[in-house]
Image (cartoon, rainbow, N blue to C red):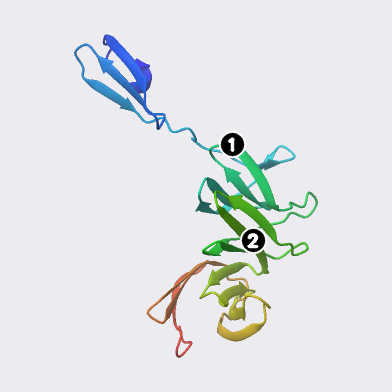
């Protein structure tokens, strides 16, 4: 333990653990040491003994909602149990690119496989999950969202996934949209070429 704490050898009078799993070490003449010891250090998902890439996570109650390179999962970090929300594909893969939420409604972007909705009980809340056929999804409000596909960002109706408007279209369709943020009628786009700012009124970069 002295090697872990990187301290000189000293006389330990007592060791105790608090309700948050932290460890307190009282010494004879070197004060009190605090060791942060959370129950959950890290976790990973694997399929056929191959670790999955984690693309994005979201938190709700005791659950860590995890978008991976093959499936969407809800992981309860207190019970250490998980639920599959989007079934992985062992042959082609079921990439979940990102997760967007509005209260207890969650939307996740994917481009392969059949679209299936799922539910998850988190405490007293019923979480509902709906896939959107896109490389990236960003909620505007309860009815509309922005979705990225092949270098173009569209505004869509969430319920029907009908395209309502084209916000911006990059000449290079290979540009990857990594993040979006709307603030003061401006759309901030993090992509594989850097950061672009689009005026939503004029639709100019």
Residue visible at 66% across and 64% down?
A: 130
Residue 58 sits above or below residue 50 on the image: below
Tell which residue pokes out farthest to the left in this image: 29
Residue visible at 53% across and 71% down?
A: 139
Secondary structure state at the residue bearing disc 2: strand
Q: Residues within 10 Å of mark 1 (few under 14, many from 20)?
A: few
Residue 66 lies, in percent from the top left, at 59, 51
Secondary structure state at the residue bearing disc 1: loop
Label 2, label 1: how far apart the Cα atoms are: 21 Å
Quarter holding the C terminus?
Answer: bottom left
Residue visible at 74% across and 54% down?
A: 93
Quarter holding the N terminus?
Answer: top left
Q: Residues within 10 Å of mark 2 (few under 14, many from 20)?
A: many
Tell which residue pokes out farthest to the right in this image: 91
Residue under label 2: 129
**Quarter residue 8 falls in:** top left
């Amino acid at each position: 333990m002295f090697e872990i704490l990187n301290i000189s050898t000293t006389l330990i009078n007592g060791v105790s653990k608090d309700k948050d799993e932290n460890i307190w070490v009282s010494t004879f003449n070197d004060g009190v040491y605090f060791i942060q010891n959370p129950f959950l250090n890290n976790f990973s998902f694997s399929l056929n003994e191959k670790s999955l890439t984690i693309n994005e996570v979201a938190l709700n109650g005791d659950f860590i909602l995890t978008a991976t390179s093959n499936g969407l999962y809800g992981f309860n970090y207190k019970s250490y149990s998980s639920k599959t929300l989007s079934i992985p594909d062992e042959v082609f893969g079921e990439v979940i690119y990102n997760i967007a939420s509005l209260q207890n409604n969650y939307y996740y972007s994917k481009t392969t496989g059949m679209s299936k909705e799922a539910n998850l009980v988190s405490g007293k809340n019923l979480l509902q999950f709906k896939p959107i056929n896109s490389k990236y999804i960003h909620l505007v409000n309860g009815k509309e969202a922005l979705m990225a596909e092949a270098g173009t960002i569209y505004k869509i109706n969430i319920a029907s996934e009908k395209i309502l408007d084209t916000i911006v279209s990059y000449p290079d369709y290979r540009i990857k949209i990594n993040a979006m943020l709307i603030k003061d009628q401006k759309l901030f786009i993090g992509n594989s070429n850097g950061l672009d700012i689009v005026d939503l009124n004029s639709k100019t970069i």
